[in-house]
Amino acid sequence: MHDQGDLERQERERRRFFRIDDTVGLQLTPIAAADEAQMIAEFSERSADVGLLNELHAIRDQALPQRRKLEYKFPTVAAYTRVLERQIEMLAIAFESRQQNIVLKQHPVNLSAQGMSLVLDPPPPPGGLLEIQLQLYPEHNRIFTLGRVLKRDTGPTAIEFEYLREADCEAIVRHIHALQLRRLRHDNGLD
């Protein structure tokens, strides 16, 4: 049982990420209470298989200071490095698509790096754990996460990402930022 202080802290934590309306590829699979421990134990391996592209982007972002130095000192080498990065990215996309033969149905959601809300009919029971596969467009980044259905009296179903790798969280943050930027440019007639 949570006291009022815990609930307020959880709400503040939940709101620390930007939220945005988006359409994503989505598959939700309820996990029986008896299977939760096994699914949690398998999470790291399964999410790594799905989120290879996100790992590559996280590694690229960590090396950004070195990349900028390279671009300044050796622009030709930096340009070639970008070509190699793009080739590796294309291979990762092809690998992921072959690994994941699942076609994800597009669904409107309100998305953040902490979770999402969406209209589901029928809504899953509060407190249940879900296996979630997401695909972000146009990047085609795939994310495998486990989320918990939050209790809601009315309206959209709120799902909190309970198990989400850091690279996948960063992929969602990058996606939301890029989507906001595209929408601002569109609204201002800059695209």
Image: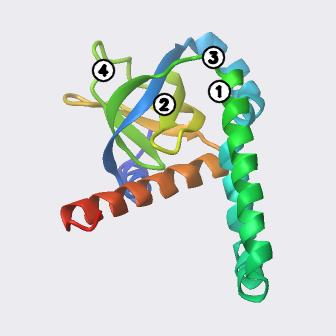
Residue 50 seen in render: no
Q: CA distance from mark 4 to mark 2?
A: 14 Å
Residue at the disc numbered 3: 101
Seen as rendered, the residue at the extreme front is 76
**Disc 2: which residue:** 148
> Is tag 1's residue or tag 4's residue first in the polypeptide sequence?
1
Tags 3 and 4 touching, CB below 8 Å:
no
Q: Secondary structure at mark 3?
A: loop
Q: Is residue 99 above or below residue 74?
A: above
Amino acid type, mark 3? Asn
Residue at 67 percent across and 65 percent down: it is 61
State the separation of the CA atoms marked 1 and 4.
Answer: 26 Å
Give coordinates of residue 65: x percent, y percent. Answer: 72, 79
Q: Are marks 4 and 2 in contact (CB under 8 Å)?
A: no
Q: Which of the two residues, 83 or 166, is positioned nearer the viewer here?
A: 83
Q: Position of residue 163 (x, y in %)?
A: 61, 38
Q: CA distance from mark 1 to mark 2?
A: 26 Å
Left or right for 73, reference 32: right
Q: Earlier in the sequence, mark 3 or mark 2?
A: 3
- Closer to the chain start, of discs 3 and 4, is 3
Residue type at numbered disc 2 = Arg
Spatial separation of the CA atoms under disc 3 and disc 1: 6 Å
The C terminus - image quarter = bottom left
Residue at image point 45% right, 26% down:
26
Residue kind at label 1, given as amino acid type: Ser
Report x, y in % for residue 172.
Answer: 50, 49
Name the residue that disc number 4 marks: 120
Local packing at callout 1 (Cα closer than 10 Å; few below 14, some 14-19, many 20+) is some
For marks 3 and 2, give the CA distance. Answer: 25 Å
The residue under the point 48% across, 50% down is: 113
Please give the name of the residue rendered at 79% of the width and 83% of the height, measured from the top-left corner: 74
Would you say the residues marked 3 and 2 are in contact, meaning their CB atoms lie under 8 Å apart?
no
